[in-house]
Amino acid sequence: MKKKEIRKNQVEEIVNADDKSNWKMTDDVVGKLEYAFAIDCNITEACAYADISRDTYYEWIQRFPLLSDRFEQLRNNPVLLAKDCVTKGVRKDPDLALRYLKLKRPKEFSEVVQIESKNLHIHLIEELGKIGNEDET
């Protein structure tokens, strides 16, 4: 199912709606929210930048789902840009490529160190017991 995209004129329609509860919703405020989300701000940061409360933000996105979709799209842009940068870098840098694979598919590419030792097991239990006793004092 294709996700509906919000067009700029739809934002203007929402902003210009003749509703007293939208009095803070101006082009400037919506633009600030869009900018904040485009640079990967969280909701609290975006609201602070736009000088609105989180309650106001949640009321707006509940009443105007297309606005919510627009903000969500913008919040994904920095991640997409970063992924693009990484994949371009992987082509040029074999070390980066290996690090990427280790993070992306650790079971397949990470270096696993497995230590089996009865003495080590006993030592770890003793050390954990000491830590537990220190907490009680």
Image: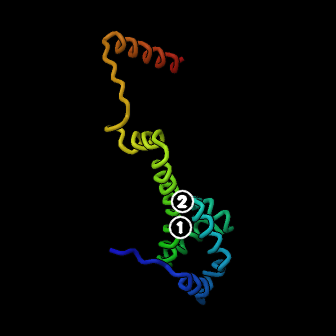
**Depth check, front residue: 93 or 83:** 93
Left or right: where does residue 131 sit relative to residue 56? left
Label 1 residue SS? helix
Residue furthest to the front: 92
Work out whether 67 lies above or below 48: below
Name the residue beneath numbered marker 2: 78
| Occupied quadrant, residue 43 | bottom right
Work out whether 71 lies above or below 126: below
CA separation in Å, label 1 and label 2: 8 Å
Work out whether 15 lies above or below 92: below
Residue at 50%, 57% in the rendered image = 79
What label does residue 62 carry, if any? none
Left or right: where does residue 73 sit relative to residue 37? left
Residue at 42%, 42% in the rendered image = 103
Q: How many numbered marks are there?
A: 2
- Residue 45 percent location from the top left of the image: 63, 59
Q: What amino acid is at disc 1?
A: Leu
Name the residue beneath numbered marker 1: 74
Q: Are marks 1 and 2 in contact (CB under 8 Å)?
A: no
| Occupied quadrant, residue 42 | bottom right
- Residue 44 percent location from the top left of the image: 60, 60
- Residue 22 percent location from the top left of the image: 61, 81
